[in-house]
Amino acid sequence: MKNEIKIFSPGTVANVACGYDVLGFCLDSVGDEMVVRKTTEKGLKITKIEGHDLPFDIDKNVAGVSALALYEDAQPDCGFEIEIYKGIKPGSGIGSSSASAAGSVFALNALLNSPYNKTELTRFAMKGEALASQGEHADNIAPVLFGGFTLVKGIDPLEIISIPTPKELYATILHPQIEIKTADSRAILPEMVPLKDAIKQWANLGSLVHALHTEDYDLICHSLQDIIVEPYRSKLIPYFNEVMLASHNAGALGGSISGSGPSIFALSKGQHKAKEVEQAMRNAYSKSEIEFQTYVSTINTEGIKILSS
């Protein structure tokens, strides 16, 4: 029985334009690393955090809260130490809290000989995600644990549906070095939307899911439209419209805000096109005075990866 595990817990893109709070996909080029080991002393401890300044208190750290939910349910005859090496900046919009929350429960589960399935792990991880966003949702967590594209069919009961990933689909991410808190970006959204807008959004989501199943890149292009959330949240992201226009002109299939922002994503057919889109997005954002990073990533169909055990 293994006593220590090292994992890579990837970043994610949630909402995916028209799929607010229900659709997400998993990245491959950016994420956190975590080391979790068994201890003879019962309980949970976070012993190391590198990369960003985060609390060591189990009850105030998303990885700690989710791990505690699993630990209290499993009641193991051991304890665990958790080391966190943050590669995703908190508040970046590419699933920083979800990577931590999902990573800790995945690692504990592996060290306990995997008594829980991926849906059950998602439920535990949602407890940590709620600490960051002030609400339990799984559109970032599910892709970390299941890999690829996932649809959250329901929260109570929790139901996750895995969606096929077209083989040539690539993501380009632009991450401005500003922070937008998930709770704040949710607070600016309207409580009610016109029925005609809701109908159009449903149609876009349905056609996007169909396009992913059938590898219909033209339909992906026509489906990546968010008419409900993006008009509000985009106001929080400097140069958002310029970046979107540049990615479109460079041949991207489409894109939108990644999660709650400030990161912006674009999907492209093929790595070469994704890199051309990356350069176009960089050129557009370099006109601002805000520092930024960009990534080009395949869609990670595996999710969390075990680096050593």
Image (spheres, rainbow, N blue to C red):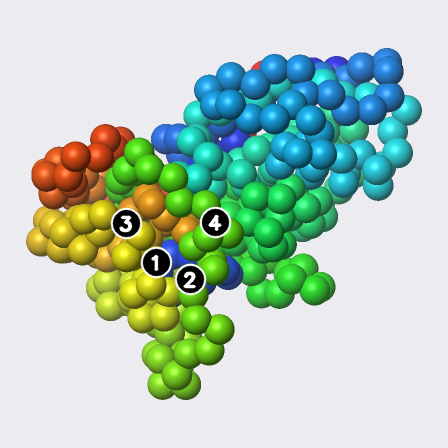
Can you give x and y, in whole percent of width and height, for residue 38 in the image? 77, 17
The residue beneath circle 3 is: 237
The earlier-in-sequence mark between 4 and 1 is 4
Query: Where is 260 relative to 41, above or below?
Result: below
Q: Residue 125 falls in which quadrant of the image?
A: top right
The residue beneath circle 2 is: 188
The residue beneath circle 4 is: 182
Can you give x and y, in whole percent of width and height, for residue 83 in the image? 62, 18
Circle 2/circle 1 CB separation < 8 Å: yes
The residue beneath circle 1 is: 233
Can you give x and y, in whole percent of width and height, for residue 185 in the image? 43, 54
Query: On the rendered image, what quadrant is the N terminus found in?
Result: top right
Element carrying mark 1: helix
For label 3, the crowd category at 10 Å Cα-Cα, with few meaning under 14, some 14 to 19 and many 20 or more, is some
Query: Where is 10 relative to 118, above or below?
Result: above
Instruction: Give the residue drawn at x 41%, y 50%.
Output: 259
Q: Residue 304 falls in which quadrant of the image?
A: top right
Q: Nearer the viewer, mark 2 or mark 4?
A: 2
Instruction: Give the residue drawn at x 61%, y 15%.
Output: 48
| CA distance for labels 1 and 3 | 7 Å
